[in-house]
């Protein structure tokens, strides 16, 4: 089923004042980065490729850089209680602090966004070592989340000056993750359009798709969502806000436990979702469960697909079709004790949509989890 879409023409290089080459990395502030890194290595199959901490001269925090395909996570923990990192974790639990965007000129990216109203978090700063130099700059976004612009065009090291390269990871068990497809932010009541305007006016993004409470609702709860995309379409940020419903929505639950706006989920792309999800399940990742009735109606709704329906049902994978093809997706349970951050695994076969036809089944599955936690 095709979804209502507003696809604005991609900006040309001449008009795109913030050309992005993609997502450089996502940095998490966590309570114990060593243990969190083990989880992502053993369960998600990511490889430890770099490290910074007391052994490398870093006195107040430690960071572990994990990578699989083009997906790169940085897990950072405080070494002392009196630090912004420790305060972030105390308030939010483990969560995303920085979405780092790859640019050719971090100074220009910072200049263009701050002159349009962005609040500066870090002015352009250059770091160097024997492998070259990296320039970074940061601006504030929703909640305590920031965007960091990274120019690493003159750097040949593994990650960043001050990090020690790790050449082999005996724990990592890769599962076929390729890149970050999109990242979803949850914001408060009636705040979605404020942040849509921020991405449009400050960062030059365009409205890519829009869903209202008629699209995303169940018997009990609803939410609103708008998807913002940058000029070349490499970076997509859906923004969610709560909508009125009979009971507490998943967005409200997130805001309660995260203590404010933040990154709700990260969608990771694969070229073989059956193999990827099978491996993730074997390695201990828990996914939402989908009722049998969803699969009895699947082919009549989406038409012919390549994957065996019985395999999709066994794994709990959802399917949706639009005018350009179809996509397959599945969602993990929250990966923290607080019901906040979770992951989506997605495979696109032509479709550029976000699974509107799956919303009802997905959100009913989330509500079953909320009910078990006593938060519906």
Image (spheres, rainbow, N blue to C red):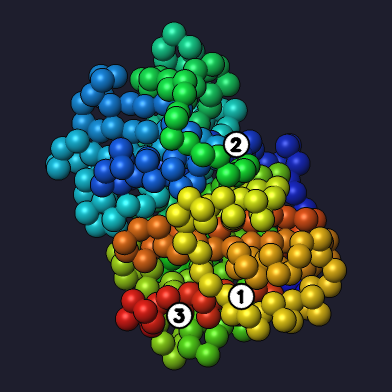
- Residue 328: quarter of image: bottom right
For marks 3 and 2, the one nearer the N-term is: 2
Q: Is residue 95 above or below residue 232?
A: below
Which of discs 2 and 1 lies nearer the camera? The answer is: 2
> Can residue 201 be seen in the rendering of this structure?
no
Q: Which residue is mark 2?
A: 69
For marks 1 and 3, the one nearer the N-term is: 1
What x and y, as percent, mark residue 91? 24, 57
Question: Left of 274 or right of it: where is 84?
Answer: left
- Residue 284: quarter of image: bottom left
Numbered mark located on residue 359 in the image: 1
How far apart in space, not on screen, are marks 1 and 3 (Cα)? 14 Å
The residue at the point 61 percent across, 64 percent down is 315
Q: Which residue is mark 3?
A: 368
- Residue 142: quarter of image: bottom left
Q: Secondary structure at mark 3?
A: helix
How far apart in space, not on screen, are marks 2 and 1 (Cα)? 28 Å
């Amino acid at each position: 089923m095709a979804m209502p879409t507003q696809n604005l023409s991609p900006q040309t290089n001449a008009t795109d004042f913030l050309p992005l080459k993609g997502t450089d990395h996502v940095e998490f502030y966590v309570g114990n980065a060593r243990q969190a890194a083990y989880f992502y290595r053993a369960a998600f199959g990511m490889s430890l490729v770099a490290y910074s901490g007391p052994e490398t001269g870093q006195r107040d925090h430690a960071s572990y850089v994990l990578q699989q395909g083009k997906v790169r996570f940085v897990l950072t923990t405080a070494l002392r209680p009196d630090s912004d990192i420790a305060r972030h974790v105390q308030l939010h639990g483990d969560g995303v602090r920085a979405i780092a965007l790859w640019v050719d000129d971090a100074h220009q990216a910072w200049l263009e966004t701050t002159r349009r109203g962005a609040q500066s978090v870090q002015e352009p700063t250059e770091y160097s070592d024997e492998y070259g130099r990296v320039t970074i700059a940061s601006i504030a976004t929703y909640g305590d989340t920031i965007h960091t612009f990274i120019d690493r065009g003159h750097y040949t090291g593994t990650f960043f000056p001050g990090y020690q390269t790790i050449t082999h990871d005996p724990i990592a068990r890769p599962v076929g993750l390729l890149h970050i497809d999109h990242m979803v932010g949850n914001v408060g009541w009636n705040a979605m359009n404020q942040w849509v305007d921020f991405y449009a006016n400050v960062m030059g993004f365009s409205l890519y798709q829009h869903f209202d409470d008629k699209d995303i609702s169940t018997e009990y709860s609803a939410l609103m969502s708008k998807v913002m995309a940058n000029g070349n379409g490499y970076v997509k940020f859906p923004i969610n806000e709560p909508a009125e419903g009979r009971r507490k929505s998943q967005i409200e639950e997130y805001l309660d436990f995260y203590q404010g706006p933040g990154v709700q989920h990260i969608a990771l792309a694969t070229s073989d979702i059956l193999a990827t999800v099978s491996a993730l399940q074997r390695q201990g990742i828990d996914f939402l469960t989908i009722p049998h009735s969803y699969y009895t109606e699947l082919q009549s709704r989406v038409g012919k697909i390549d994957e065996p329906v019985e395999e999709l049902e066994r794994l709990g994978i959802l399917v949706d079709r639009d005018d350009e093809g179809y996509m397959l997706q599945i969602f993990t349970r929250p990966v923290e004790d607080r019901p906040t951050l979770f992951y989506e695994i997605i495979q696109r076969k032509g479709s550029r949509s976000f699974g509107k036809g799956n919303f009802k089944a997905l959100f009913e599955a989330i509500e079953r989890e909320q009910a078990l936690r006593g938060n519906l």
